[in-house]
Image: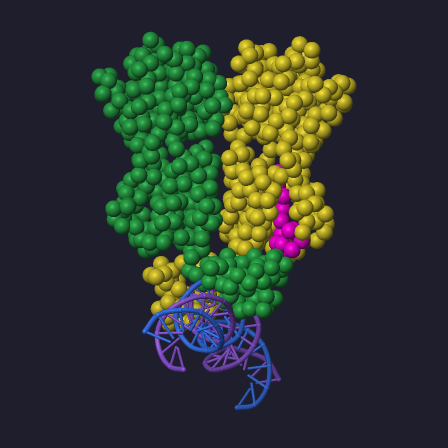
Chain colours: A green, B yellow, C blue, D purple
Amino acid sequence: MRATIRDVAKAAGVSAATVSRALNRPDLVDPETLERVRKAMEEMSYQPSAIARGLSARRSDTLGLIVPGITDFFFNELYKGIDRASQQYGMKVLLYDSEHSRERAFEGFSILSGYQVSGIIFTSKVVTEDYDPILQRLNIPVVLTLTQSAAKTPLTAFRIDEVRAMFDVVAYLVSRGHRQIAMIAGKLRDDRTGELRLEGYREGLRHFGIEYSEARVEFGQYRFDDGYQAMQRLLDRIREVPFTAVCTAADEMALGAIRCLNDHGYRVPDDISVMGFDDLPIARMVTPRLTTVAQPFHEIGAEAVKWLVRAASQPPSPSEIGDYLLPHRLVERESVRSMN
Amino acid sequence: MRATIRDVAKAAGVSAATVSRALNRPDLVDPETLERVRKAMEEMSYQPSAIARGLSARRSDTLGLIVPGITDFFFNELYKGIDRASQQYGMKVLLYDSEHSRERAFEGFSILSGYQVSGIIFTSKVVTEDYDPILQRLNIPVVLTLTQSAAKTPLTAFRIDEVRAMFDVVAYLVSRGHRQIAMIAGKLRDDRTGELRLEGYREGLRHFGIEYSEARVEFGQYRFDDGYQAMQRLLDRIREVPFTAVCTAADEMALGAIRCLNDHGYRVPDDISVMGFDDLPIARMVTPRLTTVAQPFHEIGAEAVKWLVRAASQPPSPSEIGDYLLPHRLVERESVRSMN
DNA sequence: GAGCTTCATGTCAACGCTTTCATCGTTCAG
DNA sequence: CTGAACGATGAAAGCGTTGACATGAAGCTC
């Protein structure tokens, strides 16, 4: 049986309360006593029960993270940021994979709240109105990352300016002499992100006086195969609707697109340029290295944690709740050719 | 404030114990009462506190997972298997990233045990003798995945037959007409896996009567850049020590190697063939698609969970403890050329 | 109809902590 | 020298469950 706080107390000749204080508020205990207690803990290799502590203190020092799918490539990077920051605050992270299902996401909120998490980070799917009842009675701070809220409950979100980012992509492509720019956009259930990126693309075109054509846009669900197939469809009509560059809503789709291009004898970037989006670790590992826009995953994760920790100690004022846009960055590599 | 079991009890006009039974042993409660309790829970959107339950029942329905680094590419796949299986058993997973540090790994065991996890899955680093004291007093079942134990405490492990797998790689290469086969092996602190794969390589060569040469072997720490640099070193002496194929200890290193080859004007597989190891999702996304050996990550994760769950209900007999080898599979794609 | 089971439920003591409140010296201002 | 203030500690009451045990009402058997 593991040693309890009482065992330690007995060994150190003090009360359990003192041991507890030695752990949590060492400033309140006499240095000499502290020393004795510490030694006792050491000897018995005492490890406080996080469970008991959680029950008693009504906080668990645990954060909940709900992701749509752990196999999504961006997950690792986001998690890294979250994990690092959590550690700084002495927090653990409980992971919940909603498997892209709304029901499972709802369930995630319940389950995590059963674990008394002090906050929940919700990722990448837009929060629609049907989350409201759940959010309402949750009574736990929630923050969004890589997405935003469409629900009535005001929610803070950390993300990039998707529209602006895609605008920048177009601007970059134009600066490299491209005018016929296709797009492989993202489309998913509850996915505002995809719409925003498409919007950025359209704004970019408009800004540079290029006509928007639906025939130059295809959609995919962000995975490799989606990118491949979308490219396929674009290629099917390249005679009628030619393009020299294609921007995508995700690195993984860009990879699929490139593969498709290769399979049809096109070289990237010599014949056609391709842009990614996300700057996942793989982006620099493939040939050609992917020119893409980097999302600050680590910072986003860290900021989310920071916000949650703050919110747990004092309820955030309405002015602190909102969309926080973090800076993105265009990373130039090898998949775009300059036509100039 | 969230509703507690007592609130529900009051609303349903029963005692807390009955509500608890309604939750855990519905067969013990009168159908009519059950219905009343269920309705009350529903109305108050009652969510039992996993914390309190854990404290009282001395089990937390939680598994701990210690990984050396979440950014390791194989992590997602392993996790997927673990997560799915855990769900089946109604378990949650607590993740701990040891960041490749032995001290942090030790700490992981403590922390997780503080959360009363019913079992711990330890990944990918070999468990050396200095883990013994910790393991000893841990009193929680531990299972290894993708690695094995070198400690005194007998530990069960789920992994593939690394030696055999690498042997198969060599056999495959030989069957494609390659005789001059280089290797980019893995080397890390506490990394038995790397040694085993190297051993498989040597066994393979021996079996086919090919002389082993140290000059054809380079080491790396499994990441892209390591692969790149190792390849670089191999290339530096390709005149003196020629090779037509190189096998690697990891897909990520294979990617680095390929990039390096490309940068030096070699085409893969036309000039030089490259083999990966792991069969990560990216393996099929790159050009050329990577020929590699697939580790059954999902199964390994699932088996580990299954074992742990069983071990939690009844202490495993010594005969159940040991190395379980799961079948690997060679996946033929495009990065190896046939010389025949 | 006495004595047994059986079933459904209630009572109450944990589980291992934290946290208020009380207690007991000490110190210090006036 | 008195009383207030302070610092270090202990006692005890929870926190929200579960689980062993007790209770009481039926339903049996003979």
Percent across and percent down for residue B121 are 59, 46
Percent across and percent down for residue B105 are 58, 44
Place residue B255 in its image quadrant.
Answer: top right
Residue A260 shown left or right of residue B188 in the figure: left
Identify the residue at horizontal 70%, vertical 53% (top origin). B317
Q: Quadrant location of the N terminus of chain B?
A: bottom left
Q: Quadrant location of the C terminus of chain B?
A: top right
- The residue closer to the viewer here, A210 or A300, is A300
Q: Which residues are magenta?
A: B134-146
Identify the residue at horizontal 35%, vertical 42% (top origin). A144
Residue A188 shown left or right of residue A6 in the figure: left
Identify the residue at horizontal 66%, vertical 13% (top origin). B237
Residue A100 visible (yes or no): no
Residue B326 shown left or right of residue A170 in the figure: right
In magenta segment, residue B139: yes
Residue B156 visible (yes or no): yes
Identify the residue at horizontal 58%, vertical 69% (top origin). A13
